Image (tube, rainbow, N blue to C red):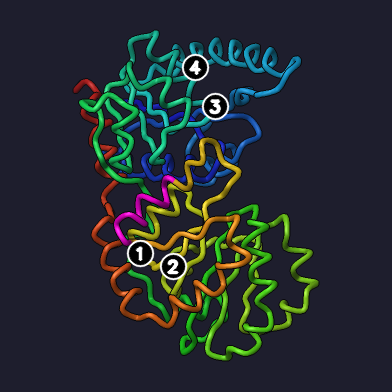
Amino acid sequence: MKVLISGGGTGGHVFPAIAIADALKSLCPNLDILFVGALGKLEMTEVPKAGYKIIGLDIQGFQRKIGLAPFKTFWKLGKALLKSRSILKSFKPDVVVGVGGYASGAIMKAAQWSSIPTVIQEQNSYPGLTNRWMADHVNFICAAFEEVKTFFPKTKVYITGNPVRQNFNKLVDKNIAYEYFGLDSTKKTFCVFGGSLGAATMNKVILEALPQIYAREDIQILWQVGRKYEEEILKHKIASIKRVKICSFIDRMDYAYAIADIAIARAGALTIAELAITGTVSILVPSPNVTDDHQTKNAMSLVQRNAAILVKDENAIKDLWKTTISLSHDEVKRAEIKKNLLALAKPDAAKDIAQHIISLIPQK
């Protein structure tokens, strides 16, 4: 039995794809899994690290520019479709799974032309262009948010939740987590997650809060500043405060969530799923630089259920720090958010998606 998983581009696509592959292997140890991604993107390094084979396509997203850029995109798409048909002919998958991203469109469309069963895994509350393009012809759509039913054929949609990395379903020893980051278990911990590249607005908020941080001996900050900003921030006087742990990237996010009294984060789909599973109280600051403002839509899916607080990026400099301090003093509000979050969690998402995929494989 063989499954091909396609797509990627960002961690929000790549890590759910790996979680699905792990769940498939858990249910069917002899299953042969192949990934197809986009050359130069995150999946080309992270998928092999997870122990899976991957083939890269030379493909890019549609460019909204005047000139030769759109022609280059279509040229690459044509070549990617031809290579996709060659991959399918060689690998002979029983099912092709698309998780979104440039490479997903080419291989999924080639699979549909070859009458191979296909499944979409949609992470966001507002679907990406690739998944909307594929939706009418897939067998199943495994989605994280009820809101996607507005965009997809309702009879094909299953609300499975977003799959998360395996260690998020394991109980974390908080003492080990505090020790891992070199932080104090007696202090209130704010965790600031700006993504692997960082978030300029969120970083600026923390830098401008320096006087208040100096004055508050009872709080500490675990701060993922992003590789892009690490050198600059390490030169700032805030780096001398032992209660502020600066990281370019946090590789043990399960430990980070375990010690977070409040998380300040972007609102990517993977982050939303991790917050729910860990019951981490959060203030969400959606990125203004994403297609169709889908992070705001993701955040609102929690805010409308009283499971998070939203601060717009444009208001963050003015409001984010004082909102964080206010929430840190409101134990009742935090308890309510945590309760509502845990009610939304779907810890078996990867397994549920894997079972839908396996149901399409002919029993041999």
Task: Please name the amino acid that badge 3 sits on.
Answer: Tyr
- Could you tell whether 282 is left or right of 225 in the image? left
Picture residue at 28% right of the left edge, 56% below the top:
345
Task: Please name the amino acid that badge 1 sits on.
Answer: Thr
Callouts 1 and 2 close, C-beta under 8 Å: yes
Q: Is residue 51 visible?
A: no
Relative image position of residue 54 (x, y in whole percent): 53, 31
Task: Please name the amino acid that badge 4 sits on.
Answer: Ile
Disc 1 secondary structure class: helix
Disc 4 or disc 2, which is closer to the eye?
A: 2
Q: Distance between the Cα atoms at labels 3 and 1?
A: 30 Å
Q: Distance between the Cα atoms at labels 1 and 2?
A: 7 Å
> What numbered label is drawn on residue 257?
2
- Which residue, given by chain and number where applicable, does mark 3 sit on? 102
- Which residue, given by chain and number where applicable, does mark 1 sit on? 278
- Could you tell whether 316 is left or right of 168 in the image? right
Callouts 4 and 1 close, C-beta under 8 Å: no
- Which residue, given by chain and number where applicable, does mark 4 sit on? 87
Pointer 4: residues within 10 angstroms few (<14), some, or many (20+)?
some
